[in-house]
Amino acid sequence: MIVIRCGTAPVPTLLGERPSVGCSEIPTKDDVNRVLSEVGPGRRLVLCGTDAGLAALLTRLMRTENLDVEIAYVTEDPTPATRAYDLPTGSAAAKLGLRGTAREVPLVRDETGTVLVGEATVTGPDGGTLVGEAYADDDKVFSGETGLLTVRPTPTMPGVRATAARPRRLRRRRWLQARAVQLGTEAGVITRDGVTGRRPVKRTSFYRHTEPWRLVSP
């Protein structure tokens, strides 16, 4: 087991005596390669950091065919990923990382080969109206205009779910589950796990990868 500390992320006392590796707030390719060269039998990594850091780690594991590595996630406060997978935070997360059991969960990625662990949102430029249409498999999420498209992974099959912002008079949002969510738009600005893209895109898709990842979970 190796603890990965991303940037200045807090490391709970329970993990203080475990072998650890420091890396960038969002681990780079070289950071992950270095960790993989050091991980021993059992192949469990405990990442202390953010959703963006976890997504970067999983992206590299996917690209290097190392998805058999067990991953525990420790963060101080709740995040979209901890909510998506019903994970504890702080010292409780550290305890789970040490003693919990890994299980296979769907791995969600986009067409660029980037993993999504918590939440992706899409708006129009400068946070404006999003124009286009999105589908969750064969079901229409929206067509025309919407304020916000939200995509999240699911801990069980089919793997991903999506919703579009609704008029304020509708209190509940309608979530659609699918294997894949596809968007076509005039211009969409994507924020993946808290990281916003540099330029608008015309198309994007989020879908379940052919292999799952191994999450240490309750």
Image (cartoon, rainbow, N blue to C red):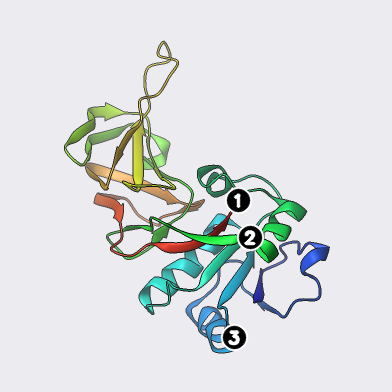
* Residue, disc 1: 218
Compared across the picture, whether 25 is left or right of 52 comes to: right
Q: Is residue 149 above or below residue 43?
A: above
Residue 142, given in percent of the width and then of the height, sits at: 25, 30
- Mark 1 neighbour density, 10 Å: few (under 14) some (14–19) many (20 or more): some
* Residue, disc 2: 100
Compared across the picture, whether 170 is left or right of 79 comes to: left
Q: Quadrant of residue 59?
A: bottom left
Q: Is residue 183 above or below residue 1?
A: above
- Mark positioned earlier in the residue sequence (2 or 1): 2
Task: Please say if the residues under marks 2 and 1 sit with CB atoms less than 8 Å apart.
Answer: yes
Q: Is residue 77 visible?
A: yes
Q: Is residue 128 above or below residue 114?
A: above
CA gap between label 2 and label 1 equals 7 Å
Q: Can residue 124 be seen in this view?
A: no
Q: Which of marks 2 and 3 is in front?
A: 2
- Mark positioned earlier in the residue sequence (3 or 1): 3
* Residue, disc 3: 40
Q: Nearer the viewer, residue 190 or 34?
A: 34
- Mark 2 neighbour density, 10 Å: few (under 14) some (14–19) many (20 or more): some
Residue at 72% x, 66% y is: 8
SS under mark 2: loop
Residue 70, given in percent of the width and then of the height, sits at: 53, 69
Identify the amino acid type marked 2: Gly
